[in-house]
């Protein structure tokens, strides 16, 4: 346990004391995935987008993504229109991790097949603390970009 983790744990514990009796999820991330999709790929690369909401009392981190579609899946952030691989994304307590077009995303390289609009792609999200979550990404048209509510 490094110093940063220790500090976070103390904060989570304090929050737990204040909220004692209110919730059984104190001190643990409670994750839910919404809005997942994959734009139909136009090459042997694809991107995935989704939102991970954390209603729990502790932060978590998305650390990796796996899928039978590709053995080469990484997570990328986009800054100044340049994308860069990162080792994890923060999923803050009471907040969300938002992967959306033009921003952070899941990157699938060397696709084993090229999914088409209407297909579904199964992926598994892996987190630092929470159990892995299986997510189905519906494949949308290449330019699909939902408006945030
Ligand atoms: Cu990328």
Image: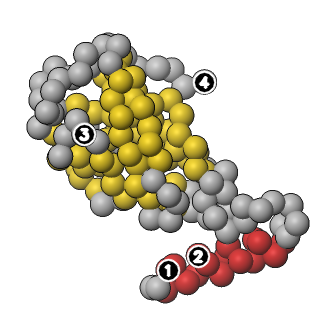
Residue drawn where x is 17% and y is 23% of the image: 114
Q: How much space separates mark 2 and mark 4, taking CA atoms?
A: 31 Å
Q: Residue 4 carries which label?
A: 1
Q: Please report contact status of discs 1 and 2: CB closer than 8 Å, yes or no.
A: yes
Around disc 1, counting alpha carbons within 10 Å, would you say few (fewer than 14), some (14 to 19), or many (20 or more)?
few
Q: How much space separates mark 1 and mark 3, taking CA atoms?
A: 35 Å
Q: How much space separates mark 4 and mark 1, taking CA atoms?
A: 34 Å
Q: Residue under circle 4?
A: 149
Q: Please report contact status of discs 4 and 1: CB closer than 8 Å, yes or no.
A: no
Q: Mark 3 or mark 4: name the one nearer the start of the chain.
A: 3
Residue drawn where x is 38% and y is 45% of the image: 124
> Horizontal and vertical percent for residue 121?
33, 29
Mark 2 secondary-structure assignment:
helix
Horizontal side of 52 relative to 54 (left or right) equals left
> Horizontal and vertical percent for residue 64?
33, 54
Horizontal side of 85 relative to 148 (left or right) equals left
Mark 4 secondary-structure assignment:
loop
Q: Please report contact status of discs 3 and 4: CB closer than 8 Å, yes or no.
A: no
Q: How much space separates mark 1 and mark 2, taking CA atoms?
A: 6 Å
């Amino acid at each position: 346990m490094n110093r940063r983790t220790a500090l976070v744990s103390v904060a989570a514990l304090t929050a737990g004391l204040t909220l004692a009796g209110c919730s059984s999820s104190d001190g643990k991330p409670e994750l839910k995935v919404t809005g997942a999709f994959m734009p139909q790929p136009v090459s042997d690369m694809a991107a995935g987008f989704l939102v991970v909401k954390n209603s729990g009392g502790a932060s978590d981190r998305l650390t990796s993504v796996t899928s039978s579609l590709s053995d080469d899946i990484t997570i990328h952030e986009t800054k100044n229109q340049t994308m860069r691989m990162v080792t994890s994304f923060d999923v803050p307590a009471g907040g969300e991790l938002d992967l959306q077009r033009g921003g952070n995303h899941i990157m699938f390289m060397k696709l084993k097949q090229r999914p088409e609009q209407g297909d579904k792609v199964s992926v598994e999200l892996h987190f630092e603390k929470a159990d892995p979550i299986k997510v189905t990404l519906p494949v949308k048209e290449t330019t699909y970009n939902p408006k945030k509510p």
